[in-house]
Image: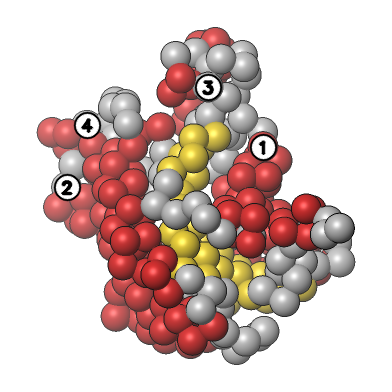
Amino acid sequence: MANVLDRFRLDGKVALITGASSGIGRTIAEALASAGASVVLCARREATLEVASGAIAAAGGSAAAIAGDVGRRALLGVLAESAAKPFGPIDIVVHAAGMNHRQSAADVTDEAWDEQIEVMLSAPFFLSRHLVPGMKAKRWGRILNIASLQSYRAFTNSSAYGASKGGIVQLTRAMAEDWSQFGINANAIAPGFFQTALTAPVFSDSARVKDLAARTAIGRNGDLVDLHGAAVFLCSPASDYITGQTLAVDGGFTAK
């Protein structure tokens, strides 16, 4: 009898993870590597990226690092080509690059709006489109987007961030509609509150952290390891019949 756990293995698969130098991107890269994937980590901060890649390699994983800015649309084709050099064509792409300028709606500049939409909504589409032909050739691929609580709820000083994360849920559905017929499944994870560099302003306020934990069903905020199971599942053959979905990994925050 086949071992069901084999369906969660990623041996022989190559994954590209953006925003992988820290936070959610890095922890997902670590999870996929632990499941057997060869991982290509991409971010703007080259030194931090090398540390993250080196840590995965030191733990026995297969990892490489390529510096790149997904906010520069004209260079995404080059990035896609570079990502395939260390281990071969990309099977899995995780779009974890993110930013939040935390401006009130009245203070959002044109530049801040455009940058956030470009990195968190446009880049997942255009970078995926560069990678899809290779996935089509194999009749297998995975696209994993990163949504948010703000895909569903509004928070202060986050209009551009919230707009991008609302859009990513619908983009995930659209990707699934277009590409799943070719064996390429597109899904998203919507994390709750996790302590990362991006959420440092939130976690600097102990009273707010306590309040946010109390608003979950579980009673605590997330640890990055809580994302590992969902990420591996949605990137593995175990999710062959799941596409166009957004899975909230939020301790039940959106259930209340």
- Please give the residue where the numbered disc 1 appears in the rendered image: 226
Label 2 environment density (alpha carbons within 10 Å; few <14, some 14–19, many ≥20): some
Look at the numbered discs 3 and 4 and tell me whether their residues touch, using CB distance below 8 Å: no
Q: Earlier in the sequence, mark 3 or mark 2?
A: 2
* Label 3 – label 4 distance at C-alpha: 27 Å
Q: Amino acid at mark 2?
A: Thr
Please report the residue visible at 54 percent of the width from the left and 74 percent of the height from the top: 140
The mark found on residue 252 in the picture is: 3
* Label 2 – label 4 distance at C-alpha: 10 Å
Q: Amino acid at mark 1?
A: Asp
Q: Nearer the viewer, mark 3 or mark 4?
A: 3
- Residue 33, by quadrant, is bottom right
The mark found on residue 109 in the picture is: 2
**Looking at the picture, how far across and down is residue 59, in whole percent?**
85, 61
Q: Nearer the viewer, mark 3 or mark 2?
A: 3
* Label 3 – label 1 distance at C-alpha: 13 Å
Q: Relative to 247, does residue 251 appear above or below in the rendering?
A: above
